[in-house]
Amino acid sequence: MEPRGCGFLLLSLHILRAVAVLEGKIVISKLGDNATLSCIYPGKELSLNNLRVYWQIDDVQEQCSVVHALISGQDNESEQCIHFKNRTQLLWDRLGEGDFSLLLLNVSQSDERKYKCVVLQTNEYTRVVHQEKVALRLAASYSQPILSGPVTNSDSTGEVTFSCSSDNGYPEPNVYWINRTDNSRLLPSELSITLHVDGTYSVLSTLKVKATSDMQIECFIENKRLQENISANYTHEKQNNDSNTESHKDLEKGGRGAQAAGIISIVILLALLTVLICWLWKHRSSKLVSYTDVQTNEDNRKLNSPV
């Protein structure tokens, strides 16, 4: 005979397990993806001919609640809601193992519901042998935030405005502004969230702060459902401007040096040309002198020769 303590513990574990099954699971899927809703029947002896499996919307107010039905090992579409036509599949290679998980194709916002899997055995009489509940939650990643600014405000001396925007996300995001100089959180001036026709959201947040020489502002867009946190930041570019100025000065110096080198090269070239011209002139002059001497001698010879 088992001790009473052990029996009570086993009973408690069974109750906890039943509560967990009834509370159900949560499946998170991205918009447009395929979602798998889990339903595992733990029975050892299993004959599909003696089983009925129903996937239903877990809402008594729904006029049509049948998502998918399997009767005696065959799909039955006679009572299936039109919204789910050609969008549901069972995992046929796992049915014999008691895996009645449902594949829901191309999910959209209208599929974000609570679902119930009910397994019935029809041997001598029909009875429920297993059931599970699954909640489908949808999500979509937000685009990389675009951080604009700072824009100087005309009505506030020394105050500037930043704006941060992101699109195509689901569900509504959380938006945070952080001052990275001390990691303090900043309160946005305005926050606008717009719902689009496709069910996704876009967000626009503005921030007004006092302008400083070392501003470091960061905007965060958080999608808690997907556990995604993307950001964009602004850092004052004073040091970059200084380096650009130094680079500009270096370029000016280099330009001046190149200009001086060019002038020197021209002077040297002119000097060489001058030397060459002088040498050619002297050489030509010496030839002229030699020719004059020869001509004079010839004239003298003609005068001295006897007639």
Image (cartoon, grey):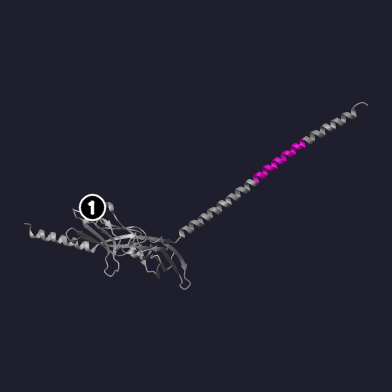
Residue 249 visible to the viewer: yes
User: What residue did someone put label 1 on?
Assistant: 97
Magenta residues span 267-286
Asked if residue 13 lies left or right of residue 164, the reply is left
Residue 150: % across, % down: 45, 65
Asked if residue 91 lies left or right of residue 257, the reply is left
Residue 227 visible to the viewer: no
Residue 194: % across, % down: 40, 68
Q: Amino acid at mark 1?
A: Glu
Q: Secondary structure at mark 1?
A: helix
Identify whether 147 is placed above or below 157.
above
Q: Quadrant of the C terminus?
A: top right
- The residue under the point 9% across, 60% down is 5
Residue 198: % across, % down: 40, 65
Residue 271: % across, % down: 67, 44
Outermost left residue: 1
Classified by dominant secondary structure, the portion drawn in magenta counts as: helix
Asked if residue 92 lies left or right of residue 157, the reply is left
- The residue under the point 65% across, 46% down is 267
Viewer-closest of 151 and 7: 7
Quarter location, residue 51: bottom left
